[in-house]
Amino acid sequence: MADEQEAALKEQLAEAGARLVSQKSLIRQLKADGAPGEQVAAEVNKMKEVQAEVDALQAQISGPVFDRDGFDDVILRRMIVVPSFEIHGGTSGFFDYGPVGCALKDNIVNEWKKHFVLRERMLQLEGTCLTSEPVLKTSGHVDRFVDLMVKDDATGVCYRADKMLEDHIENLISADPGMDKEKKEELELIYRQADAYSPDELHELISERFKIVAPDTGNPLSKPFPFNLMFQTTIGPEGHNRGFLRPETAQGIFVNFKRLLEYNNGRTPFASAQVGLGFRNEINPRNGLLRVREFCMAEIEHFVHPDEKDHPRFHEVEDVVLTLFPQDNQLTTGRLVEMTAGKAVADGVINNQTLAYFMVRTHLFMKKIGIDLKKLRFRQHLKTEMAHYACDCWDAEIKLSYGWTECVGHADRACYDLKVHSEATKVDLRASRPLDPPQNVEYAKVEANKKIMGKEFKRDSPAIIAYIGETLPVDEACAIGEKLAAGEKVDVEVDGKTFTLTSEMMKVSRATKTVHEERFFCSVIEPSFGIGRLVHSVLEHTFDMRGEELVKEKGKVDRTLFKFPPVVAPIKCAVLPLLRKEPQEKLAETITETLVDAGVYATCDTSGTLIGRKYARMDEIGVPFAITVDVQTLEDGSVTLRERDSQEQVRIPEVDRAVSTVTALCSSRLEWAKVVEEYGLLSSA
Amino acid sequence: MADEQEAALKEQLAEAGARLVSQKSLIRQLKADGAPGEQVAAEVNKMKEVQAEVDALQAQISGPVFDRDGFDDVILRRMIVVPSFEIHGGTSGFFDYGPVGCALKDNIVNEWKKHFVLRERMLQLEGTCLTSEPVLKTSGHVDRFVDLMVKDDATGVCYRADKMLEDHIENLISADPGMDKEKKEELELIYRQADAYSPDELHELISERFKIVAPDTGNPLSKPFPFNLMFQTTIGPEGHNRGFLRPETAQGIFVNFKRLLEYNNGRTPFASAQVGLGFRNEINPRNGLLRVREFCMAEIEHFVHPDEKDHPRFHEVEDVVLTLFPQDNQLTTGRLVEMTAGKAVADGVINNQTLAYFMVRTHLFMKKIGIDLKKLRFRQHLKTEMAHYACDCWDAEIKLSYGWTECVGHADRACYDLKVHSEATKVDLRASRPLDPPQNVEYAKVEANKKIMGKEFKRDSPAIIAYIGETLPVDEACAIGEKLAAGEKVDVEVDGKTFTLTSEMMKVSRATKTVHEERFFCSVIEPSFGIGRLVHSVLEHTFDMRGEELVKEKGKVDRTLFKFPPVVAPIKCAVLPLLRKEPQEKLAETITETLVDAGVYATCDTSGTLIGRKYARMDEIGVPFAITVDVQTLEDGSVTLRERDSQEQVRIPEVDRAVSTVTALCSSRLEWAKVVEEYGLLSSA
């Protein structure tokens, strides 16, 4: 769209928006004054007209509005995703996948395993969901895995504090389309930082500046306070041992690092991957699959030497263009940047090759499963968002009807996790690499009088010697040695206890030794995928309607379709008898079995419905291909094959060739265009 | 083995067993008397000799003793299955799958989905693990999902009561190989019924008859009492809602029945399947993957009309011979029976065709994944074991080094589950089928004076009318009608309240109407697979050693192998450069990538190890095929291909043909014998 045209539309939108606001305020006033129902209804009708005008202008600027009602209707009616325990009243934040959703999810997970685990030969792992307390205490989750919560002072109902702020700002902006540019930018900045504020900052914003109240009651809200998001239980019949449902799968990999490294013959870099469930006791679950309490994740932990984050395959992907949203732009212009992965690393926008490599691999994966790449961006974490130990983080965000949504995290977690588990368990979680050539290094040589020390310090004696000789920097250790040699007493603190050393206990001197290997804590680069969010995103991005004229016509939901790429399509092929006659039905069943035996998920519709309705039913759940059995099939063995998106049909002379064609189309070894070329188009049905 | 030969061996065994018992008692006596260490040690050595004699005789009778130490060593050392949170001290009952175990499990699950879900076009579902209380209250789990537990009176440590009894009996029998036949049979009967006793019966056996004490301390044990095995937590920030980790996946299907039926266009029979995690807070987890607290299950709920349990595909499987262990035999001879599925149904051994059909499908699945069918039996539940509502249950049990182990349950649960959820939620979970021809049925026609009833009973009035007209049997309703007509007052109880009816309130008369459809609660046939147990079983049954002479030689664990069928083998093909030279290594890497791109999980070993050692390493984790790159490969492009079980090798003239050969072998489209036929055997390496 030309810039001037867009500017003109935006001006019209601002004007219509202003009318909408005043109309809404008029209605509020009428209601407050107790005006008669008919009068209110008339003004509401006017308001709806203005709303339609605003929607139409918005659609012209940013494309058609997503038909959420139509979408939700199909999702529920075709049992793609449904609320859990629905007949028992349901519980928010829990969803079940029906046959179509389940197969879609399975296909996405299998494609993920091929794209990442198999292709990159990662070490797959499957840990347990229930996790014993020491693991999550060590990782910091027991103390710090919290969201800030505010409570309705009167009713006790809880809300997530940052979301209250975000919702409020969203309402402010949408209620005032003509808002002053500077003011809007300031609000958007607050919105983007909402989950990075401290409790005090949030309190100031919520209660002082915006005076936000409880949405259901209008009551005042408490100060924000932390709520731990982990589900807790006890393990064993005696009831002493606390356990938690894991909030991420990553810790299961970290605690297995030593065995994984051994499995890999001691070599780094390597990656381990895990697909499994995570659990978070969300304060306010919402937006369907986007914020739930139990979810499937797929995580990769790539272990590298901290000084060697180049990736051997980076040259394969360096020319791929990514849409980036770097820190600086978030805090200033709000603009996205298109840039090759190579340039992003060279310019220091992305911290290192390995991180950028995985971002490109994610980008390619998104394309494979049907995400619209125009609605994909990589947003860098703000400094205030990142954990203190992290080097750099980029979220792959997908634009959905709910707004930009984080679906994949890419974090350089440095060596934090391995270090804390190593310290807590006293298990050495360092890797090593040969030094070639070997290096001469200085060290503090400790000559201890073990008899005297043993007498004085008992079993602590070895730890003290190790502390001086290994833990302390060489200079500090030698300084202690000098003091001792000068006859001074020196206090050292080891494992929280203080010990007093004297000259007769040890001599410490500077020395050199030849070292053949280096021992180090690996840095961890972590791509972490929310599978449920990807399932939702694929559903939204592939959701479509037949014919422009139907877009505005509500209720015509039976003409919707999902344009799933064949590789993730839940059902690959429908086999449809044209008429409800036994020979046709029987043949259709046989063809279905042949497809199934060839590993293609096929279904057969032998109901008495008309063929057009059968196609519509299959489109509705995104079946990419349909074989139709008709009178001619019984005569000469030929069948028609239909493609979902184009609705084009060809006639294939033999059933076997139709089956092998569908098999090839589903494994992406064959393009539909080639099929049309070979058999010629049938006139559209 | 000839019967006489076996009898002779058994006699020798009994004699050696008796010597073992008296030797053990001698040692106990010496210890009690405080005999010198050397004397005790000498007698212990003698005891070990006798033990070896007993083991050897047992091996001759029942095959070689399974080398548990060697097995456990490989499982842990090659990171196939490892204890969870090991570096943090571990928690019993939790295990992680490493790369090999994970791929094995994935392959078994994928094969399961192909064999059951895809082949039988089942409706797959994925529910949540966290389940809200009303669901499990309704299913009966909150009140009755318990194991009987006994407590060490002094220390408070808990034990599972039935297992205490089983262990005690096992010890009694193994300590006395010469035990009187009748006495042994009686003990075995108690053993088999251990988990079916009531708390009082168990108490009598544990404390009175066998005087069993706490194994760790020798303290007396409490009376058995129930312990609920579900892990409990709370959902939501306010903390009011109890939630549980599901103990089975089945309930997730039952609560979705209405939507599933709609998805299936209202037609029955149909099956729904779910693969997912289950959780049980086991009192004493043990035996590795066999009794754990978090496990993967795969469950099928097949919904049928209660009077139509014939299966349309039964003719395909009726000639398959199953090894059955029916109720009667368990209580009498203890003998297994070989019988075709057809005869078992015809003779009433198995209750119905659908149940038998699934048992055969399970039998065929076991064969596919590598279970030794000689170690598979179907054990019928005793009447005392079965839930009161169940019609018939058969466990597929696999013989493992721990004994016969239930791995798959096949239960006819009747209509219990759908009925209780329907009653609790007031949601109609009945299916319907057309009646052809329509039927005339009698019904109780109620002519109510709604005005009078409404005045008297208010909002209860419709429920009373429905009770008389629909809930009560026609005869009873008409009897009430007659009493009312005769001027009597009649008390009826509806929803727990009593109402008094009079003649002016209603007339009830016998009438007929034409009914076009029948509404009914489906019966549920449930095959339920423990995936972790199957993984363990496949590992045990495919575990083998190279060369008879090595079987007794401990420590030679590097010569072990897993004979996984290619379809479940975690890694399908190894690519091995013969020498550590760059052109060979590079080519090996390229071949590996080609295999991976063709979807074959391949690995490449470029370490400096000798080729024989490389083969042994790959055998150890069950890699069925290996391609070796050598000097000749660089000259003429040919490679050798080795098969794991036979250790046979062929030379294939082109890399591409080797890749397509391996691909075909792995998808079972090609047999190794054919490959040998085509290319000819190389002399063994």
Image (cartoon, coloured by chain):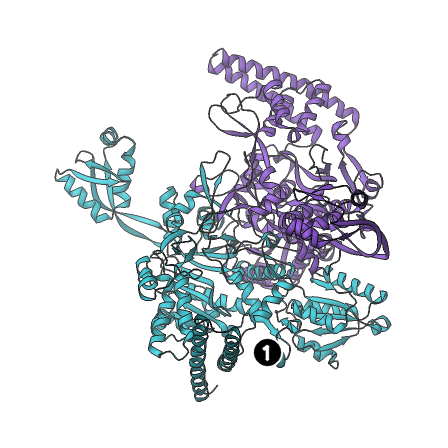
Chain colours: A cyan, B purple
Q: Position of residue B54 (x, y in %)?
A: 64, 23
Q: Position of residue A501 (x, y in %)?
A: 19, 36
Q: Is residue A639 above or below residue B26?
A: below
Tell me if A179 is positioned left or right of B517 in this view: left
Amino acid type at circle 1 is: Lys
- Image quadrant in which the N terminus of chain B is located: top right
Residue linked to disc 1: A552
The residue sitting at 30% across, 62% down in the picture is A204
Q: Position of residue A536 (x, y in %)?
A: 55, 64
Element under label 1?
A: loop
Using the rendered image of the protein, determine whether residue A210 is visible from the camera's viewpoint: yes
Q: Is residue A407 above or below residue A335?
A: above
Q: Position of residue A56 (x, y in %)?
A: 52, 81
Crowdedness near tag 1: few (<14), some (14–19) or many (≥20) residues, C-alpha within 10 Å: few
Name the chain letter of the residue that bears numbered label 1. A
Q: Nearer the viewer, residue A439 or B359?
A: B359
Tell me if A99 is positioned left or right of B513 in this view: left
